[in-house]
Amino acid sequence: MTLRLISLLCALLASPAGAADRFVVLASTTSTEQSGLFGHILPMFELDTGIAVRVVAVGTGQALKIGMQGDADALLVHDRVGEDRFIADGHGADRRDVMYNDFVLIGPAADPAKVAGLTDAALALRRIADAKAPFASRGDDSGTHRSELRLWKAAGVDPKAAEGGWYRELGSGMGPTLNTAAGLGAYALADRATWASFRNRQSLALLVQGDKAMTNPYGGILVARARNPDDARLWHDWLTGPRGKAAIAGFRIDGEQVFFP
């Protein structure tokens, strides 16, 4: 774990709770934080329960590690394979489906790889590799990065072994990755919610969508070694209950619903 993340966790666990004396530490993805979803739903939860939620926004891989170490009470992540392993290994007390959206392939409007309008993600990635067109990968073991690697595998391409330097692993969150793609005129895989909220698009456009392989489900997990298990259970039940589902469905970006409970 990086020193910066350790410092953030210490601050979240030790700082005054502000308006609420009770709090839950939630390790979640950068997409849920950067899209604005938490800014929409967390005040509703706190109003209903009097419990604050302190979010550690990291990639899904890092969120799962935080949960394994017992440094979060609950998780909201998007890598079903990793989630099931987390539960099987005894780190999680309960996992539930929360919501879904989808991934989209973003790229320069000029589209040198000629992928615009495709609904086959694997075919689109093969064309990008054949064209050696710049591709910006999060490269951070996030749920998005894990999904991207599965799509490359389905395409029969190992981008890390490719020549020409067109594939760039950044080790960054979704927003910074899109900023890099905009600056380079590169392709990138993004979750729809972060793309919808992203403003520095420059020449970037949404080029490929609609493949079932690009479905992006999110799961909520209670951590087995939760510091605040009772309040974490209240959060878990609220998020997956009628109030949480209504809050998620009511979140819009420019009038567009981007998460579906």
Image (cartoon, rainbow, N blue to C red):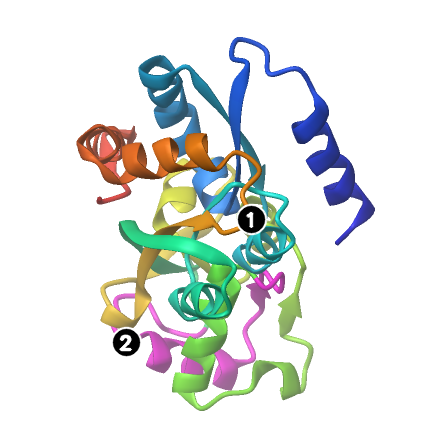
Q: Which mark is residue 120?
A: 2
Q: Secondary structure at mark 2?
A: loop
Q: Which residues are magenta?
A: 113-141
Q: Name the residue located 26 percent from the left edge and 32 percent from the top edge.
A: 244
Mark 2 burial class by Cα count in 10 Å: few <14, some 14-19, many 20+: some
Q: Amino acid at mark 2?
A: Asp
Residue that protrudes farthest toward the bottom in the picture:
156
Q: Compared with residue 92, is residue 179 higher up or lower down, i.e. above or below?
A: above
Residue bearing the label numbered 1: 225
In this rendering, position of residue 51 left or right of residue 7:
left
Residue 188: tell me if it is visible: no
Q: Nearer the viewer, mark 1 or mark 2?
A: 1
Residue 27: tell me if it is visible: yes
Q: Which corner quadrant holds the C terminus?
A: top left
Q: Name the residue located 70 percent from the left edge and 20 percent from the top edge.
A: 15
Q: Name the residue located 40 percent from the left edge and 18 percent from the top edge.
A: 46
In this rendering, position of residue 119 left or right of residue 187:
left
Q: Answer with the quarter of the image where residue 155 lies.
A: bottom left
Q: Which residue is nearer to you in this view: 261 or 156?
A: 261
Q: Amino acid at mark 1?
A: Arg
Q: Which residue is nearer to you in this view: 119 or 85?
A: 85
Q: Answer with the quarter of the image where residue 6 lies.
A: top right
Q: Which corner quadrant holds the N terminus?
A: bottom right
How much space separates mark 1 and mark 2, taking CA atoms?
A: 41 Å
